Amino acid sequence: MSTTGQISKPSAEGTRLAELWDIFPEEAGADERGVLTIGGVAVDELAERYGTPLQIIDEEGLRRQARRFSAGLRERWPNSEVLYASKSFPVVGMYKLAQEEGLSIDVAGGGEIKLALAAGVDPKILHFHGNAKSDDELKIALDAGVGTIIVDNEDELDRLERLLERPQKLLLRIIPGVEAETHASQATGGVKSKFGLPMDQAKHAIERMQAHPLMEFEGVHIHIGSQILNTRQFAESVANISTSGEFGTYDVGGGLGVKYTYEEEAPSVEDYLDAIVAAAREHLPEGARLMIEPGRSVVARSGISLYRATSVKRTGDVFVAVDGGMADQLDIALTDQRYEAVLAERLLEPWTDSVQLVGRQCESGDLMIDGANFPAPKVGDLVAMATTGAYSYTMTNNYNGALRPAIVFVQNGEERLVARRETYEDLLRLHAPAIDN
Ligand SMILES: *Cc1c(COP(=O)(O)O)cnc(C)c1O
């Protein structure tokens, strides 16, 4: 069995294996049978033990990536903080891991606060986001002792004026007016964004916070969007936030994009940090606190989704249907995200066929990959989809009665179950019985 440091990453004629290793998890490889391994465990064994669909996380690669951010920013700008944007993979085991690797944590909503607390995260490192925080959620945050609240609007300040009983650190989200080069659903910093306040209105909100005895206004926050592949856009957003005034803290958000497909290229964490910090040196006050909020780029590559092919149909096209789909990979339909997949037990066979990889939900839009290259597929094949660590599990749903997949973390030849598979009993739990006996 492969172990860390000596993972076999073969290439083979008629395949794209050599390129595959750049998009699969860092600790991915192939065993002597040509079966995909993650963290030293062959995925067919994981499928046997936990079933499919299965979310598999390379824990070592994930920890390494988390440290690239936490150590990398600290080295470049010591008065800094990296917040893991937890909506990208809101899983108790991940909150714990993030804290262990030196990341603070972004939460949006009462549910994410509860998940973080369940992981034993120190509430002081929580940063509470959201454009529609309710009284109840703010109470949860204040009762828990959440470190910082990122205020979105003046209605939220009205609420805080009613609810605050202790001093509370606050940031204000402002609209930078930066149109991110990404899918429209993922751009959040344009002038018409629903998030935050434009600079002119921000002034009034800041004055209110500064005048309030319990509000400790620390600075401003922006977030221009997600899956951004051009580091110049981050530099622009730093220049932009600096025009809002001189404050103690500047939180410049998340959004670094990752490589999903063979063709795509993404900046490294180091290139991204260099760009942000160079812009900070140029535009921000010297002693200011600099914060970033990566989500996708922390977790995406470490995760794969494992499915079983349930049918292979040669009709208008070759359709390979699997036992998952839109219910566990909603972002394909939502944001046009593209992925790569392989037949996980047949890596070394020539990838001769081009197929439509489809899910099991009743939508033609449930097309997972348009033109996946596989060896001639057959029923029962294991299909591994790459780069699904971010925004997959978080958007799982019960469409067509689908059950949420289990999650296993794998490291050094051992796996641990981090979330169990949803059951039919779970599915029925919320419903009043229609049949009274
Ligand atoms: C979603 C989000 C992030 C993280 O974005 P990624 O693209 O996952 O890095 C950071 N900050 C805020 C406010 C967000 O809404």
Image: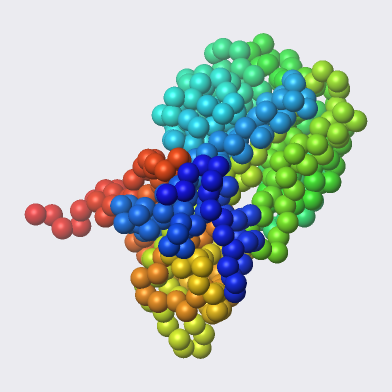
Q: Is residue 406 left or right of residue 279?
A: left
Measuring from the top left, give residue 244's x and y in whole percent. Answer: 84, 31
In this rendered view, identify the residue nearer to me: 218 or 89. 89
- The residue shown at (31%, 56%) is 48
Residue at the image position 64 percent from the left and 19 percent from the top: 169
Left or right of residue 121: residue 231: right
Q: How many numbered badges does the structure rendering display?
A: 0
Q: In which quarter of the image is residue 236?
A: top right
Q: In this view, does 210 lie above or below 186?
A: above
Please name the residue shown 80% across and 21% down the image: 288
Residue 327 as seen in the image, left or right of residue 339: left
Q: Position of residue 273 (x, y in %)?
A: 76, 36
Viewport quadrant of the C terminus: bottom left
* Residue 52 horizontal/vertical position (percent): 36, 58
Give whichever of 429, 328 is nearer the camera.
328
Task: State the scheme by which the image is colored.
Answer: rainbow
Image coordinates for residue 435, horizontal then vertical, percent: 15, 58
